[in-house]
Image (spheres, grey):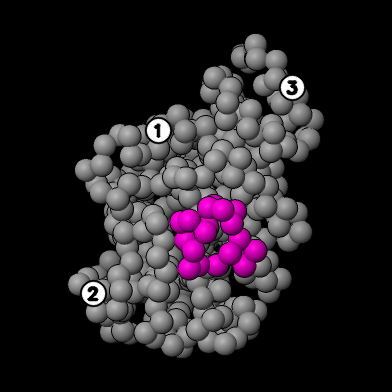
Amino acid sequence: METILTDTRLAAIAAKVADGERLTIEDGLYLYETPDLLGVAQLANKVNLKKNGNHVYFIQNMYINPTNVCEANCGFCGFKRKPGEEGAYTMDETALLDYVEKRWNDNIREFHIVGGHNTEVPFDYYLDTIRTLKKHYPQVTVKAYTGAEIEFFSRLSGLSMKEVLQELIKAGLDTLPGGGAEILTERYRAKMSPDKASTDQWLEAHEIAHGLGLKTHATMLYGSIESKEERLIHMDRLRQLQDRTNGFMVFIPLAMQPRKVEAGIKRRTSAYDDMRTLAISRLMLDNFDHIKAYWINIGVQLTQMALAFGSSDIHGTLIEERISHSVGALTSQGITRDELIHLIKSAGKIPVERDTFYNVVKVYQ
């Protein structure tokens, strides 16, 4: 039985959604303002059911952070270290293979690789990381290096971003992760990540990747100094690029984590904001197939709720996530396949194990 929307503005937005009409930034602002959160959820859920039915996707993957040495000074990061600082590390080939071997199981289908912008090593180091993994684990997809890292590699190597990507693809790169986007406005980037790729450079890295045949991912790091309008501008810039290339597979809103694990509730995004942002993402990004609920940042129970707010993906097993946990994530660093299946089934959905490119590995009825 459908809920009757008593909010006339929300009802008008619902009519646009039903007619397949693209929502504007002004529509998005109202979705953030209306007190009818469940009405927003209902709209997002209808859109998702039309796209994905009751299927909810996950992957068995492993996070690898080859180095935490970084030239950038981002206002939200607790992961980076300066060269020689206590805790700084850069894995050589032996350390990399040892790290993977200790965490390996035969069901892992993806290596998710991000790290610091380390000027102490040459571009070849980043190429060799991929080559090494492909040599020893040729069956595993390599999802490596954010759009911001691609821009950094261009400066480090003197190559164009296209040449950087071509070299990475030769080494075995299969796809780019969505990180480094943060919020795609220059006001935000000037304050929070002044040493990293600009909005245009991040978008350009992904557009070039799409042109070279790669499907990629997109994120948004929300919950700090950005306005609601900036979140929506971010989404609009992504969907404009998607209109041109159709190269993004999924959008992942990432809730900002506080600096310390013991940080109180005031330092964290609210459950209402998390659920509303996921639902609005589903409604605004009409040309994206999937919206991912990132259980690492919002927790497993809110991730279950997200499946009624327009999300069709809950990420993966991870094995050992470091970056969000370095700034206060309260979740475990990994989760088992059985736990992911239970999480999805107990929300009344059908778990679908996938590969990186949303090809179905197994449906758990």
The percent coordinates of residue 153 (x first, y second) are 52, 79
Q: Which residue is mark 2?
A: 85
Q: Is residue 47 above or below residue 82?
A: above
Boundaries of the magenta span: 183-202
The percent coordinates of residue 300 (x first, y second) are 36, 39
| Helix, strand or loop under label 2 | loop
Q: Is residue 248 above or below residue 9?
A: below
As for residue 200 lying within the magenta part, the answer is yes
First-in-chain label (3 vs 1): 3
Residue occupying the point 54% across, 81% down? 155
Q: Is residue 220 above or below residue 281?
A: below
Q: Amino acid at mark 3?
A: Ala
Q: Are marks 3 and 2 in contact (CB under 8 Å)?
A: no
The CA span between labels 3 and 1 is 27 Å
Q: Is residue 144 above or below residue 344?
A: below
Q: Amino acid at mark 2?
A: Glu
- In the rendered image, is residue 25 in sight? yes
